[in-house]
Amino acid sequence: MTFKTSRRAVKAALAVFFISLITACASTPQATPAQLQAFAPTPIPDNSGEYLSPYTSDAVVAEWVDKAINAKAGSAVGGAVGAYAGQKALEQVPFVGSFLGKKLGQSAGRAIAIKSSGGMDYIKSTSDLSFDSAKDLSVYLYANYSTNEHYPEVLDATMAIYPELKESYYQHIMQASREAAAIQ
């Protein structure tokens, strides 16, 4: 294999990669919230799960959500502080420093959001539904509340408490849409 052939192969592989990436980013959930309601997970009817619902069993926003909405700014500040700290601490290893900074930022942002929401005890005491997985919480919220006018703020507040949802929420909805389509 010559250098020219090798470069062509790399260019072709990159082109396929970027087309796949663009296609994946442009895709939308295959199922509407109404279609996913039949497949939405059933919440645990108490606060014993790992992920607390921002909505109560009465379908109203939990009290901690109002406080969490105000804490969103704190989460953003915590993320920036953590990223900067990671960058400074590990300037000689940029990728690792950035990665650790992001994790520190998420952790600091979550801690700030929890404290600003009244603390985890308050969050638990004002929640009466929960889930054992981020996927179950994501699909339940999308299927039952995503058409509500205040949903974006509620979802942002939930993501401040559970920062891992920022990266996985959309993937969970897409996966549930595919699973629902396969069953129907």
Image: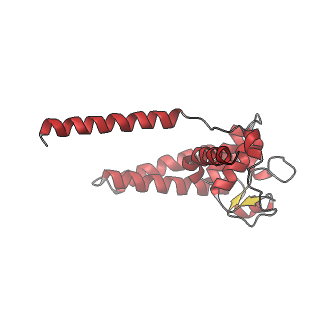
Question: For the point 48% across and 57% down, which residue is it?
Answer: 104
Considering every residue shown, the one lying at the far bottom of the view is 48
Q: Position of residue 120 (x, y in %)?
A: 70, 62
- Farthest left residue? 2
Q: Residue at x 60, y 50 (%)?
A: 165
Can residue 67 be seen here? no
Q: How many marks?
A: 0
* Residue 136 pos. (x, y %): 68, 55
Specify the quadrant that holds the C terminus: top right
Which quadrant of the view contains residue 177?
top right
130 or 75: nearer the viewer: 130
- 162 sits left or right of 39 in the view: left
Q: What is the x, y in percent for residue 2? A: 12, 40
* Residue 58 visible in rendering: yes
Q: Which quadrant holds residue 27? A: top right
Q: Nearer the viewer, residue 95 or 74?
A: 95
State the residue lying farthest toward the right: 58
Q: Closer to the camera, 129 or 22? A: 22
Residue 99 lies left or right of residue 156; in this view the side is: left
Residue at the image position 63 percent from the left and 56 percent from the top: 134
Q: Quadrant of the N terminus?
A: top left
Task: Tell me how the rendering is colored.
Answer: secondary structure
- The x and y percentages for residue 46 are 80, 64
Compared with 37, 149 (above or below) is: above
